[in-house]
Image: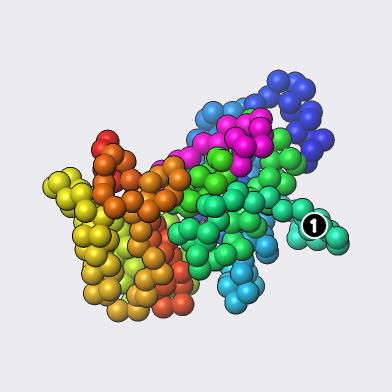
Amino acid sequence: MQQHADTLRSRGDQIGFVPTMGFLHEGHLSLMRKAREDNNTLVVSIFVNPTQFGPGEDFEDYPRDLERDSDLCREVGTDILFFPSAAEMYPENFRTTVNVSGLTQVLCGKSRPTHFQGVTTIVAKLFAIVKPHRAYFGLKDYQQYRMISLMAKDMNMDLEVVGLPTVREPDGLAMSSRNTYLSNEERRSALSLYSSLAAADRMVREGITEVKEIETGVREIIESESHTRIDYVEIVDPQELAHIDRIDGRALLALAVNVGQTRLIDNVLIGENA
Ligand code: AMP
């Protein structure tokens, strides 16, 4: 892969890169189409990264379908599909980690304390292997996008990190490879994530600025559905991801909810010009 990247770069090609864990859906494909548009080479990686799963999480069960994924990659014009093995990525005696301090411990970091270090470490490695000019991430995983942007900036990584909007099912459910775990009944309950975000957006547009009041409204909508157990509902500053008390400009409303056994996340930007 590194040799391919060198060859492409030496002939002046621009490399667009979309890292994924596979089981591709429209969310992934939207990133790939944009990368295809902006660059003359599109590299997609599929790697279910063991170090970003905590003990007892779904690493073993995470859905995988490389054959279907490679067909979809071909359809959107992927030039290189990179799918390394865990043994190649983490050989014996691997000992380096990349950690964006502070941001790993908020929002999803509270209940997944080792997750983001796993993400930033693997993405740093993938950047060093694929050598992209631009890398594309979904705002569905807003905290991840923010941390990768900061990592690239702090470490002078010579690439642009691009964040793209969340792609949703027609009824509003954010697309996720994990949606496949949901029963029909759970899927209906899961719609409350989107409806609560939409309700919060309406509250802010109507002039409510008290964060507690909005968070309570969101919690009530989600808790009124069966099978839902809230991990967090938080309104934070979109740059630092720090808690705020009052909406004054743009803010991020982020949430994580267990629906049955499945942990789902979603978010929306609210407030001025959102
Ligand atoms: P994953 O395979 O879940 O690691 O996701 C790979 C990339 O796709 C990440 O940048 C995600 O943020 C992005 N992504 C996942 N779901 C969506 C979605 N519904 N809309 C937009 N991007 C998404």
- Judged from this view, the residue extending furthest toward the top is 12
User: Residue 121 appears at what percent x and percent y?
Assistant: 68, 51
Residue at image point 54% right, 66% down: 112
Return the residue found at the far left: 206
Q: Position of residue 133 (x, y in %)?
A: 64, 30
* Relative image position of residue 28 (x, y in whole percent): 51, 49
Name the residue carrying label 1: 95
Q: Relative to 173, is 90 on the left or the right?
A: right
Q: Nearer the viewer, residue 29 or 150?
A: 150
Q: Taking 141 as reference, is 86 left or right?
A: right
Q: Magenta includes 96?
A: no
Question: Which residue is depicted at the point 13% across and 47% down?
Answer: 206
- Who is closer to the viewer here, 175 or 252? 252
Residue 78 visible to the viewer: no
Quarter in which the C terminus is drawn:
top left
Asked whether residue 208 appears in the rendered view, the answer is yes
Q: Secondary structure at mark 1?
A: loop
Q: Is residue 38 above or below residue 233?
A: above
Q: Is residue 178 above or below residue 254?
A: below
Using the image as rendered, state which of residue 113 and residue 29 is in the foreground. 113
Screen quadrant of the N terminus = top right
Q: Which residues are drawn in magenta?
A: 151-167
In this picture, is 261 found above or below 222?
Answer: below
The residue drawn where x is 66% and y is 32% is 156
Q: Residue furthest front?
A: 245
